[in-house]
Image (spheres, helix red, strand yellow):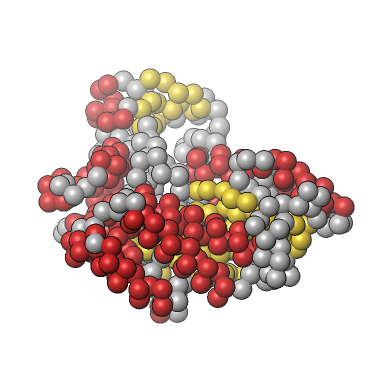
Amino acid sequence: MTAAVACERPAVEVADVIREHGEAFRAKWGGILGRTQKQALRDLARCRTAALGGHVERCLDCGHERIAYNSCRNRHCPKCQALVRARWLEREAEHLLPVEYHHVVFTLPAELSELALANPAILYDLLFQAAAATLRAVAANPKRLGAQVGVLLVLHTWGQNLHHHPHVHGVVSGGGLSCNAQGVVDASPRWVACRPGFFLPVRVLSRVFRGKFLDGLRQAHHAGKLVFRGRLAPCANRNAFARWLAPLYAKEWVVYAKPPFGGPEQVLKYLARYTHRVAISNQRLVKLEDGRVTFRYKDYADDHRHKTLTLSAEEFLRRFVQHVLPKGFVKIRHYGLLANRQRQEKLTQCRRLLLRAGVAARLQEVGRPPAIEPARDRRCPHCGGQHCVRLPLPPTAAAAADTS
């Protein structure tokens, strides 16, 4: 066997920080870490190391061999999202319509961050529900659009500096099937299109979103579903909780509408970047020295300038684990025309109406646009050949080649 060649990797990875400083971090914070957070730390540290096993890849063209270790497949791992994302995009392409799409972002106020960290499943689920209900209600309003639109929402819980910043990115079709004010599609619907370049008024979306989220939060409190810790402990009392919520009713909540996408190809390019993103990619890490981690970030408050930030390894890991989602929590959801129930029937109806209206000439482009790169086949790093076979990994080779 020829010498194994290590796969190309960034100079520093999140896994390196965990392997070097994870034990000390767990010793200090283990008492408040959830099982899913602890599992994520274990998985990421072992990803693509001998601990998970592996195999030898032999190129039949040049005879080159290299050791390849198994992936952890944890959805929070920066190294394990490419194949999952490619397969998901291939399925999602079938649901796109040949229309303009809009990008809307719903953000929770910073005042709710501490409560969300104590009750992640409840508040993140409520964030989804409130954002989707807002889009459905405002779009169904006959004074706005009067249509049921297709909505895809993706949860992100982080900002560029890894602080807790829960928000959902929405991709919404620029039109939909005509419906009544309650959102029920007409028996014989017609296609209702948005004005070119404009979706729905942001201020209206913001205020409806605020009302729906806070109403859902009050109901969760009345049902005894919320946990209050630390300085929020007094809010377990109903009157104290009402006083705490009052300023949030007066505050303007952030709902941001970005310029519309041009069509299905642009939507898929966007989804490829956002849907399976984790809190921080390995490519953003600059160095790990003397117990400190330096990484790149974009400062949106300073004209989107690119900067670097240095944190202690402990603080870096503390921020990172904040973004580990509860077990089984679904972070990508579909609503309206894209909801699982009757999705194919509604999309077929949409395509028929669009074709009749003469605006569906690009239907054939929706299959798998060339702008989206499919999952790459494994190639030999020595000659670039694709004729590779997998062989069992000898135990002695695994022990010798493990660089973890």
Report if residue 26 is visible in the image.
no
Q: Residue at x 50, y 40 (%)?
A: 84
How far from the left and from the top, in percent, is residue 186? 76, 52
Q: Is residue 266 above or below residue 306?
A: above
Q: Is residue 27 above or below residue 236?
A: above
Q: Quadrant of the C terminus?
A: top left
The image quadrant of residue 81 is top left
Relative to 8, 98 lies left or right: right
Q: Quadrant of the N terminus?
A: top left
Report if residue 14 is visible in the image.
yes
Q: Residue at x 40, y 54 (%)?
A: 124
Relative to 4, 365 lies left or right: right
Q: Residue at x 27, y 67 (%)?
A: 239
How far from the left and from the top, in percent, is residue 283? 39, 56
Closer to the camera in the image, 252 or 360: 252
Relative to 332, 183 lies left or right: right
The image quadrant of residue 197 is bottom right
Relative to 59, 221 lies left or right: left
Number of numbered discs overlaid on the protein picture? 0
How far from the left and from the top, in percent, is residue 263? 70, 58
How far from the left and from the top, in percent, is residue 47? 33, 38
Closer to the camera in the image, 56 or 369: 369
